[in-house]
Image: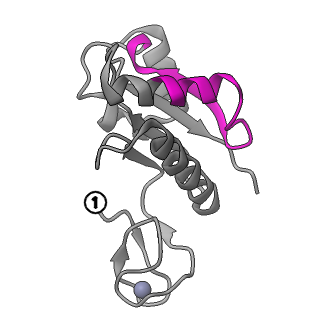
Amino acid sequence: MKESSLCPECGNSRHWMGDCQNCGSKTLPELLIDVVELNLKSSAPSAEEALDKLTHQLRRASEVDLKAILLIHGYGSGGEGGRIKKVVRDALERNYFSDRVTEYYFGEELSHGNLLYQGLLRRRPSLKRFLEQFKQGNAGLTVLLLGTSL
Ligand SMILES: [Zn+2]
């Protein structure tokens, strides 16, 4: 993943998750971005591991004040991609993340230029460079808009 923030202690660019890889600082980073892409399929976790990973990253996201996450979970009727998608979307619909996620948009409902897409980009213009690559709706992703819990 690209470096997306700065370490307030050593001033180097660092990842937004975890401790600074340059100096080991545990101080929260200064974000250079307000949207990140999170791929839950990478390292091929089980659906349960993917949900744990998302829970952990959402907690961190609210600490550093991220505004949105483009979640890539894959799709399909069979296979782990389909299971991750189902588990994540079930959790969203049961308000499991409602303290952090204020709104969510299913990728298949967002196609280039439709009303939902336009409305989402008005709310969060920095999503544009992420969404532009998906000309058609894409069921393998979900966009999460995050609230500030602090
Ligand atoms: Zn550092």
Image location of residue 42, percent across then percent down: 29, 46
**Residue 28 part of the magenta segment:** no
Report the residue at 59% width, 23% height from top.
90
Quadrant for the C terminus in the image: bottom right
Report the residue at 43% width, 55% height from top.
33
Number of on-image labels: 1
Quadrant for the N terminus in the image: bottom left
Q: Nearer the viewer, residue 106 or 45?
A: 45
> Which element carries disc 1, helix, strand or loop?
loop
- Image side of residue 44 versus residue 88, left or right: left
Rendering quarter of residue 26:
bottom right
- Image side of residue 16 versus residue 144, left or right: left
Q: Nearer the viewer, residue 45 or 19?
A: 45
- Ligand 1 located in image quadrant: bottom left
**Does the beta carbon of the residue at mark 1 sit less than 8 Å from ligand 1?**
no
Q: Is residue 145 above or below residue 1?
A: above
Image location of residue 14, percent across then percent down: 37, 73
Residue type pointed to by label 1: Lys
Q: Nearer the viewer, residue 98 or 73?
A: 73
The residue where tag 1 is placed is: 2
**Residue 108 part of the magenta segment:** yes
Tell me how the rendering is colored.
one colour
Image location of residue 63, percent across then percent down: 63, 62
Q: Look at the image and give the residue range highlighted in magenta.
A: 86-109
- Image side of residue 122 versus residue 21, left or right: right
Report the residue at 34% width, 28% height from top.
81
Report the residue at 32% width, 36% height from top.
130
Q: Nearer the viewer, residue 1 or 30?
A: 1
Image location of residue 73, percent across then percent down: 38, 32
* Within-10-Å neighbours for mark 1: few <14, some 14–19, many 20+: few
